[in-house]
Amino acid sequence: MNFKIILPLLCLSVFLLACNGINSNSGKQTQSTTNDSIGNLAELEKAALLSKKVTDTVLLGFKFGMTKDQVLNHTQSLYHEGKLKQDYNGKYYFEIATKTGEANKGFLFADYFENKLFSIGLTFSKATSNILVFSAMNDLLKQKYGDADMMDKPFNMDVYESYWLRNNLKIRLTSGMPEASVHYIDMRYEKQKEHADSVEKANSAQKVKSNL
């Protein structure tokens, strides 16, 4: 009997049961719909932002508001300290060990709004098991931030999400195809970035249309 095959199946079964409900703080969990999930998440975001407190230092010591140059300098410092590694393509990654003892590479990514860091995270695009990475990251986040505020299965497929909301910080942990990932997002600027992106997309579409 192959233990390495059985353990991922057991972990998957656990998360199938855990993700039937959407709010880990509720007494009874029921199957969520996509609209219910969006509504509940928006309410949780609004409540978190009401604290007026600021959480700016997140993953690996990165700080919201850093410029691209500051992020690059901090990334290189982490690499020299051995906290980050680099692959043959020059991409930086952080290793996470799953319960089977296998190391998985979480590749670092960063998003900016007006040249200031508002989102940073890890993408496990080559994980041996997305659900095991999800489980390992969930344990690490729980140790630092406590229980997740919301768990969800938003699509009719093997996609699972957990959310932590702490002041302006939103952490989104995802497992599904084609990858597992974790995002640390500054909610103060998230909507502004989304609006700016939609305006830019509309302007680009209009330029293409005018040239036809």
Image (spheres, rainbow, N blue to C red):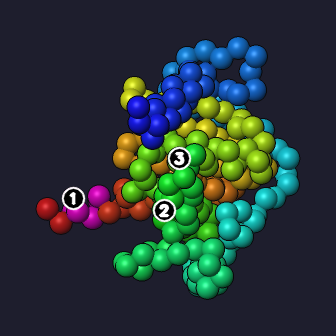
Q: Earlier in the sequence, mark 2 or mark 1?
A: 2
Q: Which mark is residue 105?
A: 2
Q: Considering the numbered disc 3 on the image, is that residue within a helix, a strand or a loop?
A: loop
Query: Mark 1 highlights which residue?
Result: 209
In this orientation, which residue lies closer to the viewer: 75 or 113? 75
Q: CA distance from mark 2 to mark 1?
A: 42 Å
Mark number, residue 140: none
Q: CA distance from mark 2 to mark 3?
A: 15 Å
The span shown in magenta is 205-210
Q: From the image, which quarter does the C terminus lie in?
A: bottom left
Q: Mark 2 falls on what kind of element?
A: strand
Please give the count of numbered marks on the rendered protein: 3
Does 141 sit above or below residue 153?
A: below
Q: Residue at 55% of width from left, 29% of height from top?
A: 15
Q: Nearer the viewer, residue 137 or 165?
A: 137
Density class for disc 2 (Cα within 10 Å; few <14, some 14-19, many ≥20) is many
- The secondary structure that dominates the magenta segment is helix
Q: CA distance from mark 3 to mark 1?
A: 53 Å
> Which residue is pictured at 75% across the width and 26% down the height?
25
Decide if residue 174 is in sight here: no
Query: Which residue lies under the disc numbered 3?
Result: 100
Kindly identify the amino acid type of the residue bearing the numbered disc 3: Thr
Contact between labelled residues 1 and 2, with CB atoms less than 8 Å apart: no
Q: Position of residue 165 (x, y in %)?
A: 72, 44
**Amino acid marked by disc 1:** Lys
**Number of other residues with Cα within 10 Å of mark 3, as a class: few under 14, some 14 to 19, many 20 or more:** few
Left or right: residue 45 compared with residue 175: right
**Marks 3 and 1, the one that precedes in the sequence:** 3
* Left or right: 209 in relation to 62: left
Q: Is residue 8 magenta?
A: no
- The answer to which quarter of the image holds residue 208 is bottom left
Q: Against 151, is 29 above or below? A: above
